[in-house]
Amino acid sequence: MYALLAFITLPWVISHPRLFMAAAAAGAYYFQSTGRTLHDVRTEIASRVAGILPEDLRRDDILYDQMTVVFLHLFVFRYLRLIVHLISFWLFYRPTPVPINPTLFPSDCTIILPTVDPENRDFEECITSCLENGPGAIIIVTVGAELTKLTKSIVKPFEQQFPSTEISVRTADEANKRRQVAHGLRYVKTKITVLLDDHVFWPTERFLPTLLAPFEDPKVGIVGTNKRVRRTDTGFNIRSFWNMLGALYLERHNFEIRATNAIDGGTFVVSGRTSAHRSEILKDPEFIAGFTNERFFFGMFGPLNADDDNFITRWDVRHGWKIKIQYCPDAMIETTLGTYPKFLSQCLRWVRTTWRSNSASLFTDGTVWYTQPWCVYAVYWTSFINFALFYDGALAYTLFKSPLGTADNLKYLAAWIFCTKMVKLTPYFLREPQDLVMLPGYFVFAYFHSLIKLYAGLTFWETNWGGRNLSAINNQAGGGPDDDDDDDDDADDSSDDSVDGGVQLPPTPPSSRRRKTTGSSSSGSGADDGSNQGRTINRGGTASGSNRGQPKNATAGTKPARKAQAQPMTRVSSSTTSSTSSTSSSRWQRCPGCRKLHSDSGSVDGRGGCQVQSPGWGR
């Protein structure tokens, strides 16, 4: 018993050594002043517990049996959490209502939507459901020239259908969600930023107002939602089974985040499928540097691509921002999940994330010990030992070996375990009762998941993005942003720093970000070839510093040839970036130092004013 007690209290001892020493000193003083021993205290507690037990359980051979004590500790450690969460879920939680006179509106939101597959069947519906909520702007961030062109052709009809929302397509230098998000943050000008995955749908037009409601509290920095998986495959078949597993996965998450958020304001993560943030948090240079260059295990592994939502959640907690989960019908998102074999690789990635992120929360950061004391026990510490296959086996074994190990008691334990596992699943099966025939398969997978969790813990350093081959996408994209063929966004993307680990926050793009016709807009060069006159496009930036159309002003009317082998992107300071502004008499060429388009007017050694002194600088 003492060993188990020490195991449970170990994390508090590690994180609060001074507090533990003070508690130990107080305990020693108590025992010395009263003349009692630890054994006396244990005996008194056992006798008091015996007073509330049935008479047939008050025998000393039961109360002081080692296996009985271990069984009771295992039982209480697991199910105390469930009982408290049930009470919190049903009695304590309340979503933030939408105020009658809000200070924030959907137009105060910018949506950042990273994608590497704009042709997926969910992409257009995702954008449509988002635009129907009337956000101020949507920034779609993809990679490579081909994907950029494809994405622009897909979103072009939406520009006319939803003129009140500014839609822009940006090109990041790598198929990496963190870097794509960081790239999009450069163009955010609104108070709130919403991060959105490309396979997520907002079923109601009241979604954004409901999501914004908690931000009326100035201490709230991040808002999450409840989630639901679409049943894209139905019937009694293998595809439907995997789809059901994905739906149940998120159903369990909904229960946990609502319950814990109502107790101490904590949650294990605010899902990146859809999350709202104060823009001042995400645009912080320190945040950008950490977000794009997070390493783990004493800096030996990284930088991470996965775990992006966990990093943001931990950042908010560490900097004193409150978390709010909006669990209500108007704040519910829908998503697609659960296809074989992608779902297995996703489970493996998620569990590895749990090992890394929860360890960081407890032992590297430590803020949760003060701000989320209940979550320390119920979420973080529990995640390290809650292997259903082994934990249920330990419960059955210790009960069987104790004086209470009768056949009837083992049946009662099995029934209890079954019922408690159904608590989180009940809402789903009330909606989809036909899936009850696949319930045995779910339990088989739940126990198999313990092996996945064990394997993930033993291979926690693996950081690949399960379910997508991002390396192939990067190779196809050419490893960097395209500056020659991007008719709409050359003005901004060609003067941007590459998103790199430890890079400073880039300068804010020009504020004149509206739809213009090339015949009437002024880029400061006067070199438009006339081929684009009269064509309305939605740009991300204009005016000074722009190089829109400049590669097209060669006498032959052709674009400059791309170098056979692109040099690595380099870090460029804000002052360097701003120095790329040109006059109408400038000649544009690709800088050998930083691979950007510069004017040669006033240049030093033909570098067009670039402060990069050599191609190897900043690597």
Image (cartoon, rainbow, N blue to C red):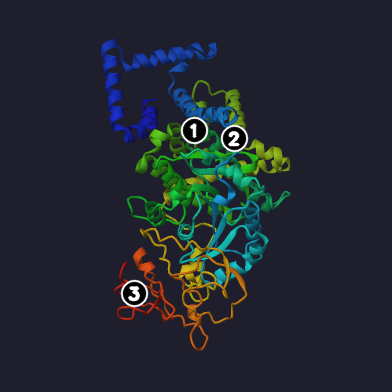
Relative to 442, is 28 above or below? above
Q: Quadrant of the N terminus?
A: top left
Q: Position of residue 586 (x, y in %)?
A: 41, 80
Viewer-nearest residue: 302 or 344 = 302
Does residue 581 appear to the left or right of 323 in the view shown? left
Of mark 1 and mark 3, the one earlier in the sequence is 1
| Spatial separation of the CA atoms under disc 2 and disc 1 | 17 Å
Relative to 76, is 116 above or below? below
What residue lies at 48% left-to-right and 13% top-to-bottom?
A: 50
Q: Residues within 10 Å of mark 1 (few under 14, many from 20)?
A: some
Q: Amino acid at mark 1?
A: Ala
- Say which element carries label 1: helix
- Say which element carries label 2: helix
Q: Amino acid at mark 2?
A: Lys
Q: Residues within 10 Å of mark 3 (few under 14, many from 20)?
A: many
Q: Mark 1 near mark 3, Cβ–Cβ under 8 Å? A: no
What residue lies at 51% left-to-right and 34% top-to-bottom?
A: 260
Q: Position of residue 244 (x, y in %)?
A: 65, 47
Relative to 2, is 435 above or below? below
Instruction: Return the residue at label 2.
Output: 421
Q: Residues within 10 Å of mark 2 (few under 14, many from 20)?
A: some
Viewer-nearest residue: 568 or 511 = 511
Instruction: Return the residue at label 1.
Output: 394
Query: How many numbered discs, if any?
Result: 3
| Spatial separation of the CA atoms under disc 1 and disc 3 | 70 Å
Residue 609, labelled with which disc? Answer: 3
Q: Amino acid at mark 3?
A: Gly
Q: Mark 2 near mark 1, Cβ–Cβ under 8 Å? A: no
Of mark 2 and mark 1, the one earlier in the sequence is 1
Does residue 111 appear to the left or right of 561 in the view shown? right
Q: Nearer the viewer, mark 1 or mark 3?
A: 3
